[in-house]
Amino acid sequence: MSMWNSEKKMVLQAAQQMAEKGLVVGTSGNVSLRLGKYGERELLAITPHGRYYDSMDVDDIVVLDFEGECVEGELDASIEKMLHIGVYKARRKVNAIIHAHPVFGSALAVAGLEIPAILDDQVTQIGGEIKVTEYALSGSPEIVQNVLSALGPRNAVLLANHGALSVGRDMREAFTVCELLEKTAKIYICALSLGKVNLLPAEIAEVEKAYFAALHGDSER
């Protein structure tokens, strides 16, 4: 049995839940978990490329180092592996990442519309507005830089013409952010269709962003 069996199971369960909830279709999307150091190497566990989630098992989850080299597993890792590694390198409090293709979030990503600060829970849990990246091809070095730039210190971002990325201090938080992003996107699209969007008062948004930063920020570095 793998020494990372429980962590790999966590990745598998989150990926299967992502599919069951309709946040992805088919084999799309990917999920990872930071494993910490093994000797001198930083490691992560990540879903494999091109596999259906309902027929996946724990042994299909791949363990990689931060160079993208395989440490454990027979399958090819997700083509977005360097994106996950890039986020872990940039955001040391992030320990789990979920890349999904939710319908409403993806609609805003196609329209190129960022979600301003409209909801209390959006700001306290995601960190403020939800930006849209510049477009880049999946698996490319450009997508890593574009995502890091648009994600900033926050916990979610929309990928232009593609989908969404959600992060958290643990897997449950990353998954909650993934669902919260889609809920926020639905509400924003509904409000736009009603013809009126009232933003959170600026002073409230600033207080809530400060609360978020205290929990998630790397300011004590």
Image (cartoon, helix red, strand yellow):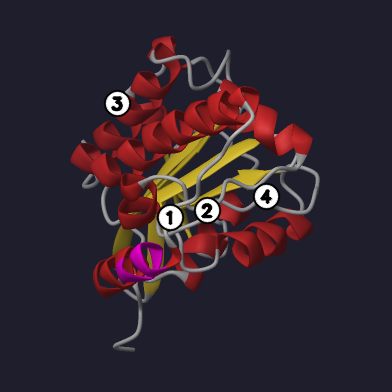
Q: Amino acid at mark 2?
A: His
Q: Amino acid at mark 4?
A: Val
Mark 4, mark 2: which one is toward the viewer? 4
Q: Main secondary structure of the magenta part?
A: helix
Residue 24 pos. (x, y %): 53, 20
Instruction: Give the residues drawn in magenta, as a range.
Output: 203-207
Name the one closer to the observer, 208 or 99.
208
Q: Secondary structure at mark 4?
A: loop
Q: Is residue 194 above or below residue 99?
A: above
Which residue reaches farthest bottom? 221
Q: Earlier in the sequence, mark 4 or mark 2?
A: 2
Residue 41 pos. (x, y %): 40, 70
Mark 1, mark 2: which one is toward the viewer? 1
Q: Secondary structure at mark 3?
A: helix
Alpha-carbon distance for marks 4 and 2? Answer: 17 Å
Q: What numbered label is drawn on residue 84?
A: 2
Q: Earlier in the sequence, mark 4 or mark 3?
A: 3
Q: Which residue is mark 1?
A: 155
Contact? badges 4 and 2 (CB < 8 Å): no
Alpha-carbon distance for marks 1 and 2? Answer: 13 Å
Name the one closer to the observer, 20 or 10.
20
Q: What numbered label is drawn on residue 213?
A: none
Alpha-carbon distance for marks 3 and 2? Answer: 18 Å
Q: Quadrant of residue 73?
A: top left
Residue 209: say if magenta. Answer: no
Name the residue located 75 percent from the left edge and 42 percent from the top edge.
112
Q: What numbered label is drawn on residue 13?
A: 3
**Quadrant position of the C terminus in the picture:** bottom left
Q: What numbered label is drawn on residue 132?
A: 4
Q: Secondary structure at mark 1?
A: loop
